[in-house]
Image: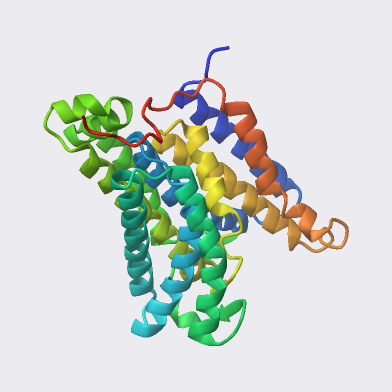
């Protein structure tokens, strides 16, 4: 069976979204609110997925994005309160993610550690570190709500039946996905990145350090995941809880697999998953629905969509031959 092209995936996604939005509008739900929620949910997924596409194109795997989300969400709020500015929280959250990516990359690239185990170790560490930081910084377990003035403000647009906010970080995520695609397909560095994942020996013979290329992509991937983690409390929720990541790091990994390491397709996948979360949230808080359908059943929608999309799209995907394999220079 022939795998759909990128254009066909775009058309399929646009058509399904349009049909779903039409059905939602007929049902009496606010389309503007749905789009706003869907784009907010898309943003951290898109940032992390695009960064991981670059990372895996170079031959390294980071399954620790769930942990990066959790750690940078907490520290992003901490830095925002220190500097009394949400922008500083986002930037320093991204810097924290870059540092984590650097450390994880050094362990895997230079230390030749098993990349999957190292990433899962990061996730497990974050499960304990997140609540510990919440307690040690704010002396309150499990949750912290910060002043609304520290939220990174969205840009408001009118749409039919209301207004919806579009965060500058969402716009940045879309631009970053386009730039990442151009980087991989139109630049010399992009050729080196792809060669480091496909044939690292050829890169080494050409006089380019495979280690440096892979480590650079680990740092960039970590920085983008860190920005996504800091965005969740500072640009979306308005507070941080110990379960704030809620599996979104793994959904971002699913977007990477769906995309076959294509940054633009990763953006499409992130929108699909984010839109499904927006639908779940809109349905869950709608009068007349929340009394009938259990809240936690509705919250299953994004994860069910993830499984369905992966099941339908995983066949025929080709990944770099050296993906996940430490490079040993002879």
Write the residue at 49% across / 24% down.
317
Write the residue at 38% across / 77% down.
79
**Residue 134 vs residue 82: left or right?**
right
Residue 231 lies, in percent from the top left, at: 45, 64
Give residue 309's quadrant in the image.
top right
State the quadrant of the C terminus.
Answer: top left
Question: Vertical placement of 51 versus 97: above or below?
Answer: above
**Residue 6 vs residue 307: left or right?**
left
Question: Vertical placement of 73 versus 194: above or below?
Answer: below
Write the residue at 33% across / 73% down.
88
Q: Nearer the viewer, residue 139 or 87?
A: 139
Residue 131 lies, in percent from the top left, at: 57, 74
Q: Residue furthest top?
A: 1
Way the structure is coloured: rainbow
Q: Nearer the viewer, residue 318 or 183?
A: 318
Write the residue at 71% across / 42% down.
23
Q: Nearer the viewer, residue 77 or 320?
A: 320
Question: Vertical placement of 256 versus 316: above or below?
Answer: below
State the quadrant of the N terminus.
Answer: top right
Residue 132 lies, in percent from the top left, at: 54, 76
Give residue 127's quadrant in the image.
bottom right
Residue 282 lies, in percent from the top left, at: 69, 57
**Residue 230 vs residue 187: left or right?**
right
Residue 188 appears anywhere in the view: yes
Q: Residue furthest front?
A: 330
Residue 42 appears anywhere in the view: no
């Amino acid at each position: 069976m022939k795998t759909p092209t990128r254009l066909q995936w775009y058309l399929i996604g646009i058509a399904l979204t349009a049909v779903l939005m039409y059905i939602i509008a007929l049902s009496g739900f606010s389309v503007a609110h749905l789009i706003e929620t869907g784009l907010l949910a898309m943003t951290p997924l898109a940032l992390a997925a695009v960064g991981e596409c670059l990372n895996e194109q170079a031959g390294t795997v980071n399954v620790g994005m769930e942990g990066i989300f959790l750690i940078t969400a907490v520290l992003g709020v901490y830095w925002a309160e220190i500097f009394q500015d949400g922008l500083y929280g986002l930037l320093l959250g991204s810097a924290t993610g870059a540092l984590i990516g650097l450390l994880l990359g050094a362990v895997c690239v230079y230390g030749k550690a098993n990349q999957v185990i190292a990433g899962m170790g990061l996730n497990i560490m974050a499960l304990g570190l997140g609540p510990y930081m919440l307690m040690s910084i704010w002396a309150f377990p499990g949750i912290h709500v910060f002043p609304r003035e520290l939220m990174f403000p969205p840009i408001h647009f009118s749409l039919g039946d209301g207004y919806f906010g579009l965060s500058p970080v969402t716009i940045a995520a879309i631009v970053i996905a386009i730039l990442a695609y151009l980087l991989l397909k139109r630049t010399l560095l992009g050729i080196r990145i792809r060669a480091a994942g496909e044939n690292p020996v050829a890169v080494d013979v050409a006089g380019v350090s495979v280690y440096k290329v892979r480590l650079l992509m680990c740092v960039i991937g970590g920085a983008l995941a860190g920005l996504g983690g800091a965005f969740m409390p500072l640009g979306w929720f308005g507070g941080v809880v110990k379960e704030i990541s809620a599996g979104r790091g793994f959904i971002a990994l699913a977007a990477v697999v769906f995309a076959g390491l294509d940054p633009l397709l990763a953006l499409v996948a992130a929108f699909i998953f984010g839109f499904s979360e927006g639908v779940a949230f809109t349905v869950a808080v709608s009068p007349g629905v929340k009394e009938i359908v259990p809240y936690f059943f509705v919250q299953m929608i994004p994860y069910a969509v993830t499984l369905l999309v992966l099941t339908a799209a995983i066949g025929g995907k080709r990944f770099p031959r050296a993906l996940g394999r430490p490079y040993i220079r002879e």
